[in-house]
Amino acid sequence: MATANECLILAAGTGSRIASQSGGSPKPLLCLSGAPLLEHILLSSHAAGIQKFVIVVGHRADAIRRWLADWSHDGIFVTLVENPDYHKANGISALAAREQLRNPFLLLMADHIFEPRTAKALLRQPLAEGEVILGVDYNIHRIFDLEDATKVKIQGNAIVDIGKDLAHYDALDTGMFLCGATLFERLECAKKNGNCSLSDGMRLLAQERNLKAFDVGDGCWQDVDTPEAFAYTESIFERDFLESPILHGFAHV
């Protein structure tokens, strides 16, 4: 099976929890170690083998559009999709990109940074018809903000439940998914009153035993969605994200 070379990045939310840190900029453009979060994600994904990106924008879409217009990198091709309903849950942002993605793709969040080797390993996993594969972290003790993390319950390699409030869980959701068209079908099924989250769609897949777990092992990742998480990530970035293209001089100047 060929490795996916497309990626969907959800970058439409208001980022209200980190607004005090962003100074009015949209969260994807918040600078971490000298580069916007969105640049971290684009370059790390490209280092993992991704060439084509679909980015869903909403809140302050104009600022992200301007930044991308001034930013370029050989081998990276970006399509922007605007979600006018960005105030709704993130499943609606994913659905906004449905017509742009026909082949298996990597799904990422605009506020989760990761190492290229982790994404590369996930992209190599065989994706069966009807399945979604989620990168999960069993190293629960190393998570900065466990209360805010999305938890997963696993049986064998199948995720049987997912959510932030699970009382019993085995691992944590890293925000990295290998998907096909099934994702969009399940998000449509999960809609209630015109709204749905990614987790809503994932729970339907889990009920069907079609949401699979991929262990990211010791691969580093971090959700940067609060001022506290941002400060923590800044403090450990050069120590823990040694593979980052940002540290190796590939960031746009």
Image: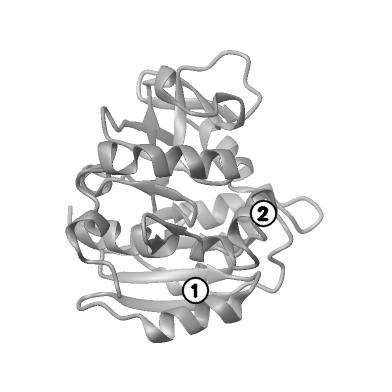
Front position in the image: 171 or 95? 171
Return the residue found at the far right. 193
Residue 250 falls in image quadrant: bottom left
Q: Is residue 237 above or below residue 140?
A: below
- Please tell me which residue is depicted at 52% across the width and 75% down the height of the picture: 64
Distance, label 2 to label 1, CA atoms, is 35 Å
Front position in the image: 113 or 207? 113
Q: Position of residue 34 (x, y in %)?
A: 37, 61
Front position in the image: 121 or 112? 112
Q: Is residue 36 left or right of residue 160?
A: left
Number of residues whose C-alpha sits closer than 10 Å to that of mark 1, classed few (under 14), some (14–19) or many (20 or more): few
For the question of whether residue 48 can be seen, the reply is: no
Q: Position of residue 40 (x, y in %)?
A: 35, 58
Residue placed under numbered mark 1 in the picture = 99
Residue 226 falls in image quadrant: top right
Q: Is residue 61 above or below residue 179?
A: below
Q: In the drawing, what numbered circle is on residue 11?
A: none
Residue placed under numbered mark 2 in the picture = 20
Front position in the image: 236 or 148? 236
Label 1: state its secondary structure: helix
Q: Amino acid at mark 1?
A: Glu
> What colour scheme has been applied to the protein in the rendered image?
one colour
Number of residues whose C-alpha sits closer than 10 Å to that of mark 2, classed few (under 14), some (14–19) or many (20 or more): few
Q: Position of residue 69 (x, y in %)?
A: 42, 86
Q: Is residue 69 left or right of residue 160?
A: left
